[in-house]
Amino acid sequence: MNVFLGSEAGAEEPAPDPGLTPLVDVVFQLLIFFILTSTFATPALEVDLPELAERIHFETPDAWRVELDALGGLAVEGQSVPLEEIETRFRALIAGAPERETAIVAADKRVPHGRVLEVMERLGKAGVHQLLFEHEAGNTP
């Protein structure tokens, strides 16, 4: 029995087929790395956020203005609004101007963080896709 293991004269050898196994292994290792490092990114300490040393200015001519004062008052575009009605008010505002999906939140520094988060949550449910926070410049050294 004769077995021919070489190539025949004039026959082209097929191009080598690269295996995907090494690529899958690398992608899998990267995935594991990013999953593990993302769990360590959660803050473990309470932090006292500093004031900003200088004013940061964004050009936002099409942004709605939301104000929160230290006494718990809430205003949208200069009109007083109860917290329970802010979602309804913003749905109406966005329905009238769908291209305006940004809100500037101007909250007094004595407003509890939970109150600001509650307003943010209701704005998000109403269709606001971008929030900017107004601040005062601190004392510059």
Image: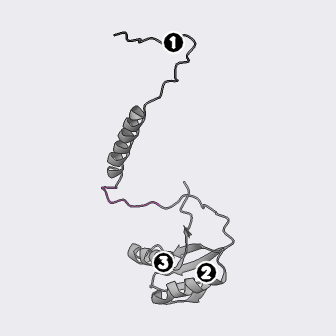
Mark pair 2, 1: CA separation: 74 Å
Mark pair 2, 3: CA separation: 12 Å
Q: How is the image coloured?
A: one colour
Residue at point 62%, 83% (across, down): 95
Instruction: Tell me if 46 is positioned left or right of 63 in this view.
Output: left
Q: How many other residues sit within 10 Å of disc 3, few (<14), some (14-19) or many (≥20)?
A: some
Q: Quadrant of the N terminus?
A: top left
**Residue with the mark numbered 1:** 8
Residue at point 60%, 61% (across, down): 55
Q: Position of residue 127 (x, y in %)?
A: 54, 76
Q: Is residue 122 above or below residue 20?
A: below
Which element is circle 1 on?
loop
The answer to whether mark 2 and mark 3 are in CB contact below 8 A is no
Residue at point 56%, 18% (across, down): 12
The answer to whether any part of residue 111 appears in the image is no
Q: Is residue 15 above or below residue 118?
A: above
Q: Position of residue 62 (x, y in %)?
A: 67, 73
Residue 125 - label:
3
Which element is circle 2 on?
helix
Q: Position of residue 47 (x, y in %)?
A: 36, 59
Q: Is residue 72 above or below residue 35?
A: below
Pick the front one: 117 or 88: 88
Residue pushed farthest front? 1
Dividing the picture into quadrants, the one containing residue 32 is top left
Work out whether mark 1 precedes mark 3 in sequence or the reverse, and give the earlier one: 1
Which element is circle 3 on?
helix
**Residue with the mark numbered 2:** 94
The answer to whether any part of residue 34 appears in the image is yes
Q: Which residues are magenta?
A: 43-50
